[in-house]
Amino acid sequence: MRTPDAKATAISRQYAAWPYPQVPLLANVDPTHPWQLHCDSLWDRCGSGPAPARPRIWIAGCGTFQPYVFSIANPRADIVATDLSEPSLRIARRRCALHGVRNVSFAPCDLQDESTWPQGEFDLIECYGVLMNLSDPERALAALARRLAPHGVLRLMVYPQFSRTRVFQLQRIARLCGFHGDDASHPSKFRSLVKSLTKDHPLRFAFTTYADSKNDAGVVDAYLHAGDRGFTGWQLGALLQSAGLRPANWMHRPWAQPDVAQERLALMGRAQSTVLGYLDLWQELRQNFVVCCTRRDAAPVVDDASTALRAHPSFHGRASSLRHALRLWRLRTFGGRVPTRTGDGDVVLCARDARLLASGTGLDADDAALLRATGLVLGTAGEPTAISTHLEIEGHDAWLASAQSLRIGRLAPNPLYLHLFAALDAARSWPQLGLPHLDDQLRAWLPWATPLEHERIRFGLTPYATAQRRQAAMRDHLEREPLPTAASYDEVRLRDDASKLQSARAFATAHDAPAQLTDAAARELWCLAFGQADLFLTMLSA
């Protein structure tokens, strides 16, 4: 039995006090909604062929809601749901009982202690939003890979480093002020603090547009977390490679598959981890990294009668419930929309398409051609993308450390916006990437970038919009020699430093922050909470 480390103990305590997600017990999911989580669909998308008729599924870190969703998606599977939090397991078990779910078993489990794991191999392992909480994610992922069946699929979600920067900055404000999940009053106090920021503040925008910020458990999970982290695309690629896994299908926005991003952004010849790292670097990744992996040592699937074209199991055959049967009848009669898990828009089915799906197996080529784009026909996935999965690029760690470092100078990059400078300065500061000049990168982004800035928030949400709206200042910055760095806020002084320290302390006190701010902490808090108007600040050496 492994002795839990301090981080694991803190996270266990957090989810015991704040089970997540906070979803009403009677909230239900339409039986066709989670169709992309059906084991047969995931196997097909990953080139593994048809899944077993009764697959074995492990939800590793199930929270309060995932067991119910996976049981709806896979009514004929044997599902094992585990979590570090006993209260989360109790809620998940109660939810399944209320909805008549009978194919899920529950057990406590610490993913950092294999002695607590369920026995045997699994056809599908779901590890969604868990790996970044572990002290040794590489070791845990490699162990999970060993539990996959020969053609099994592991679906993984981790946070991206740059696209989640504003969440990490809000976490930093919480830590500076002393807010944490062990005090029941802190989520509401922190919510009040963030909402007091000016309406043009990027962090206020990030907080108020995040759905979970409306409930205390969501505030704790996102902003008062006991220890999560993000991964760059390059770090994720290395992690998968080290674990003996091959990324076979991506389920995030935009574009999901790296070959599409590669073509649209003129990054031909790059590895998947490079393409996805670049997408995250420019903060155009509109959700977390979500990847379905297979074992690198999996033998190729041989085409035979079992891999013939067939309709998605959720849309034909015997319905799993009366609600499901009624939903299918409505689709066959009137057509309708079927949501996707990637958020790229719904699949729109006319009644004729729904009736074709209801015919089940044996779809002819013409029928399949009509339905191929929906993803609801299996046996059409073919081989996964031919793009190489990962290529080590020298200097990643040094570049990342430099990109996150404080700069000293009279026109130093504002620490609130360092993640924007990382993208705009990448071609210069990390030449090993072989990126073109910034102007050429901006031209490549022109048809695809989706700036979040609006009239009130003039810049600071995305690198593309910041570059467009602050062109002269950015070009001047890139033409200058890189500024020296400081190791901490102890080594710098702001213009009118004493006044700014006083403002930061007054701000924390006004919101009942329990921490006594040191000068360095107050300086950092001022930059994060009050520095949003300026792309550059005066940061003098102490």
Image: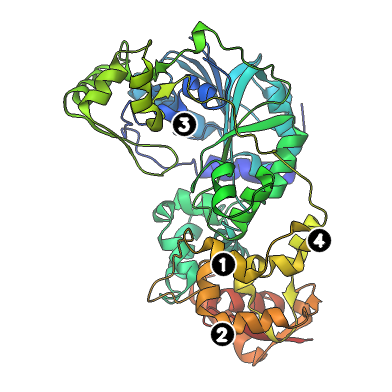
Q: Is residue 514 above or below residue 62?
A: below
Mark 3, residue position? 66
Separation (CA) of disc 2 from disc 1:
38 Å
Residue for badge 2: 503
Tell me the mark number nearer the camera, choosing from 4 and 1.
Answer: 1
Q: Is residue 401 above or below residue 57?
A: below
- What residue would you read off at disc 4? 398
Instruction: Estimate how packed mark 4 is, as few (under 14), some (14 to 19) or many (20 or more) residues with alpha carbons within 10 Å.
Output: few
* Rendered location of residue 402, percent (x, y): 77, 67
Quarter placement of the N terminus: top right
* Residue 389 picture quarter: top right
Question: What amino acid does circle 3 point to?
Answer: Gln
Q: Residue 301 carries which label?
A: none
Relative placement, left or right, of 296 versus 471 is: right
Which amino acid type corresponds to the residue marked 1 in the rendered image? Answer: Leu
- Which residue in the rendered view is the most extreme toward the top? 305
Q: Residue at x 80, y 72 (%)?
A: 487
The Cα atoms of the two marked residues, 4 and 1, are separated by: 25 Å
In the rendered image, residue 513, in percent from the top left (x then y), is placed at: 55, 69
Tag 3 secondary structure: helix
Disc 3 crowd rating (10 Å Cα; few below 14, some 14-19, many 20+) is: some
Secondary structure of residue under mark 4: helix
Q: Mark 1 points at which residue?
A: 442
